[in-house]
Amino acid sequence: MTFELKNQLTKQNVQDAIHQYKSDSEPSELIFNFKRCLVHFAVDDNEVYMCTELKKEKTWFLPFNKGHNDGAGNPPNPIGIKTDYLWKEILTKGELSNILENYAQVVCEEDEETKKKTYKQIFPDFTVSPAKSPREYAMSRNPLFISVLNSPISQPLTSIPRTPHVSHKRT
């Protein structure tokens, strides 16, 4: 995992972090290689974005936010910054292990005609639904996770994958 952290004190935000990934990070550097680095996070005081493959200006980031009032962003946090859930809820030993074991993956697909292989790196985004169980919510939002949710999981999910972020690369 890599992180580009920005804050209001430096007058920078998540868009500056995304721009820095796109302009300053060299995808050919070992740390940024596709399938070598699990996910890249751009983080500021209010929002978190993520991507699984850096491709300079073609890099595509998705929000990794909780959502607020049925919309984008994160809810107010009376005891800290809006994005502290990233390290308090996601980057804990238990939750990160859960993500690595049950959700994050590299998938290889082979075109039957050309025999070309396409690799997709998948990392789930973050969603919480208090109205439904994790299983009901994930199944209603994304059938890709039905098979994962039907497998035995020893602990309840605290983060629920909504839609995987998928990067494509042909080799």
Image (tube, rainbow, N blue to C red):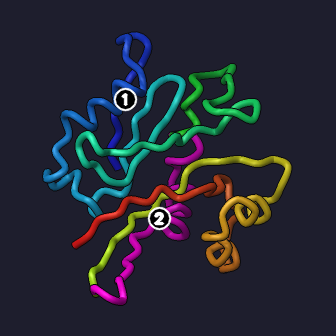
- Left or right, 25 with respect to 8, comes to left
Does the magenta segment cover residue 95?
A: yes
Structural crowding at the residue carrying mark 1, measured as other residues with C-alpha within 10 Å and reported as few (<14), some (14–19) or many (≥20): some
Which residue occupies 70% across, 59% down?
Answer: 141
Name the residue beneath numbered marker 2.
104
- Left or right, 139 with respect to 120, comes to right
Which residue occupies 26% across, 69% down?
Answer: 170
Near-viewer residue (132 or 92): 132
Amino acid type indicated by mark 2: Ala
Q: Position of residue 94 (x, y in %)?
A: 56, 58
| Image vertical order of residue 1 relative to residue 113, above or below | above
The Cα–Cα distance between marks 1 and 2, rounded to whole angstroms, is: 22 Å
Amino acid type indicated by mark 1: Leu
Q: Give the range drawn in magenta.
A: 87-114
Near-viewer residue (108 or 114): 114
Does the magenta segment cover residue 51?
A: no
Can you tell which quarter of the image residue 108 is in?
A: bottom left
**Residue that extends furthest to the front in the rendered view of this protein:** 113
Which residue occupies 65% across, 48% down?
Answer: 127
Which residue occupies 23% across, 43% down?
Answer: 56
Under circle 1, the secondary element is: strand
For marks 1 and 2, the one nearer the N-term is: 1
Under circle 2, the secondary element is: loop
Tell me the quadrant of the picture where the C terminus can be found: bottom left
Name the residue beneath numbered marker 1.
5
Q: Where is residue 147 in the image (x, y as percent from the top left)?
A: 64, 78
| Image vertical order of residue 55 relative to residue 142, above or below | above
Structural crowding at the residue carrying mark 2, measured as other residues with C-alpha within 10 Å and reported as few (<14), some (14–19) or many (≥20): some
Q: Where is residue 30 in the image (x, y as percent from the top left)?
A: 16, 55
| Callout 1 touching callout 2 (CB < 8 Å) | no
